[in-house]
Amino acid sequence: MITSFLVKSLDRTILIAAALLLALAVLVPALNLLTAPDHPLHVPTYLVSLFGKYLTYALLALALDLVWGFCGILSLGHAAFFALGGYAMGMYLMRQIGARGSYGNPLLPDFMVFLNWKELPWFWYGFDMFWFAALMVVVVPGLIAFVFGWFAFRSRVNGVYLSIITQAMTYALLLAFFRNDMGFGGNNGLTDFKDILGFNIQADGTRAALFAASALALALSLVVTSGIVRSKFGKVLVALRDAESRTRFLGYRVEHMKLFAFTVSAMMAGVAGALYVPQVGIINPGEFEPGNSIEVVIWTAVGGRGTLIGPIIGAILVNGGKSIFTAAFPEFWLFALGGLFVLVTLFLPKGVVGTAQQYLARRKAHRAAERQDGESDKEQGATAPEAMAAE
Amino acid sequence: MTGKKPKSLLYLDGVSVSFDGFKALNSLSFIVEPGELRAIIGPNGAGKTTMMDIITGKTRPDAGEVFFKGDIDLTKKDEAEIAQLGIGRKFQKPTVFENHTVWDNLELALNRRRGVFATLFYRITGEDKARIEEILSIVRLAARRDDLAANLSHGQKQWLEIGMLLAQEPELLLVDEPVAGMTDAETAETAILLKEIARTRSVVVVEHDMGFIRDLGVKVTCLAEGSVLAEGSIDFVSNDPKVIENYLGR
């Protein structure tokens, strides 16, 4: 059952993309670690971390594509799930610091000592163990998405109203995480990480391993997402995106379908956040900023929604552009981003990948038609009955 | 709610519903027997579509009883449950899944388990394939199986939707204006198709086209202002003075 699910997911494009990611997962760390710094093919560590970060953004965009591209749920709060996953990882990394903090308290992270807290809050228990933190990385975003989706989809909140309440959700979380009383480090967030699984988080080897893990997670998520959208369940998702009430009258529980997709997507976003935090070295409430979620929508739109590969390419393109642009003209980046969104919406509504696919499909159909014409000229009317039947 | 209902397939009694003070249905009573093909006519605003909304769970009645197969209370169920019970509905405007192929449209409509995990791990069986092939030939779309539904003509979309309803294997089929916008030839074909379908299940057809209803040759119910005005053969109903005044005469 599971194998057939996976075999079906592997259409050629997905297979190539996943193989490419796996190759990157091996190649980039190798070029970073095994070549001398003056070697022409050497990849400096800062680039490894930068591209590792892009890969986690790509995973976030892929997660959004599952709900937006295939299910029609325009979530403007997906960065919240990313941040929640990031916080779960951040809490583990804080506990790993141990007595090496500025206050030298073996149990309490620095910010708690600073706030005069005497003991660890209950929700920090267990985060000293990696497996527990890793579990929370998917459970917490998944649970919040499940509860949120349960109420939203059951009440049939759709379209722009749903988008607005997802914005409200991420904004509410932003305000909550800003408060010192919440116990997540207030507006400073969690930082000054020392090691992960016993390895120094600043070391080249750890950075390379985090890059490889990000590429691997993205490849795996791509295959799983592809399996979901190519299954009958995926067809139901597209059906309810295009004609929700028709789908209901066919007997499908639309709200359950949406809830499943939304929850899976939030979990993927959580994983992305968890891989992001050790690579950038900090997580703070700014990650809940409503603007962040909107940026994810732009990456997805630029790459092409509903194509799976598109959002990955879009996330890397836009963020690469952002890194270059913000270095050259820092104050104009937001205008460029807004302009990009308007241009893509107007001139490339299917995004980069969607437009390319459309072009290829048209050329293929054109060629097939030409070939058929050639044949029917030779064998006079051999294809005519078929053509008539088609009319 | 266990009062003995007659063995009718669908039983509506005293159903009323109003929207912002407008009485869309006014104490409507209506019965469909198993295996019956029934036509419903009536002027705009007579409550035909509202009645279908109530039967399929889209709208809740303010008052009245709606029972399916004698003792299933439809007013307590939602659209998906009612569809799974075996009531299929065809909308006025053809609604097929335009981004899916003809084949996939039928596969989605097949009466199989419809849960999240059942669909996630679904594999098409030989039996399902045979059933889809059979429906494709009934609705005359076998040659277009791999085309996107968006590329079908208006009449073909109507047939595809009828095919999807067949795939659902409903016991009761509600069909809203199936021949609106069809050519005369398509209309005649559709009448034949509906009569074929009604051999194995009950069908309720709402239609304005009197010629089409004459072709069907079945019992007719005329609705006006939310309740039944007249019921009987087409000749009986079309000669009823109230019907002429309310509907045909205008």
Image: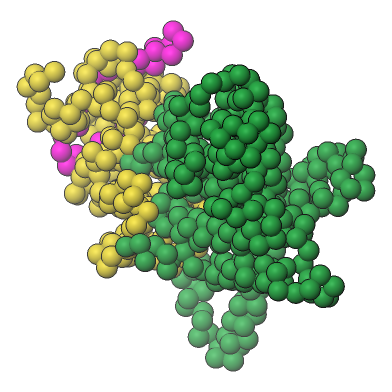
Q: Residue at x 70, y 29 (%)?
A: A188
Residue A312 is situated, as x and y percent measured from the top left of the image, at 65, 56
Q: Is residue A108 in view?
A: yes
- Using residue B12 as the reference point, say whether residue B132 is left or right of it: right
Q: Is residue B127 above or below residue A158?
A: below
- Using residue A183 as the reference point, say whether residue A102 is left or right of it: right
Furthest toward the top, the residue is B21
Residue B8 is situated, as x and y percent measured from the top left of the image, at 13, 31
- Using residue A54 as the reference point, say whether residue A246 is left or right of it: left
Question: Which residues are the magenta region?
Answer: B17-41
Supply the letter of whichever chain is green: A
Residue A160 is situated, as x and y percent measured from the top left of the image, at 61, 30
Specify the colour of chain B: yellow
Instruction: Tally the marks.
Output: 0
Q: Is residue B102 above or below residue B22?
A: below
Give the overall secondary structure of the magenta segment. Answer: strand
Q: Residue at x 27, y 68 (%)?
A: B126
Q: Quadrant of residue A277?
A: top right
Between A271 and A63, the one lying in front of the other is A271
Furthest toward the right, the residue is A329
Furthest toward the left, the residue is B4
Residue A135 is situated, as x and y percent measured from the top left of the image, at 45, 44
**Placement of the C terminus of chain B among the 4 image quadrants:** top left
Q: Residue at x 78, y 54 (%)?
A: A320
**Placement of the N terminus of chain B among the 4 image quadrants:** top left
Q: Quadrant of residue A73?
A: top right
Between A149 and B136, the one lying in front of the other is A149
Please tell me whether residue A187 belongs to the stretch shown in magenta: no
Between A313 and B33, the one lying in front of the other is A313
Q: Residue at x 32, y 30 (%)?
A: B78
Q: Is residue B159 in view?
A: no
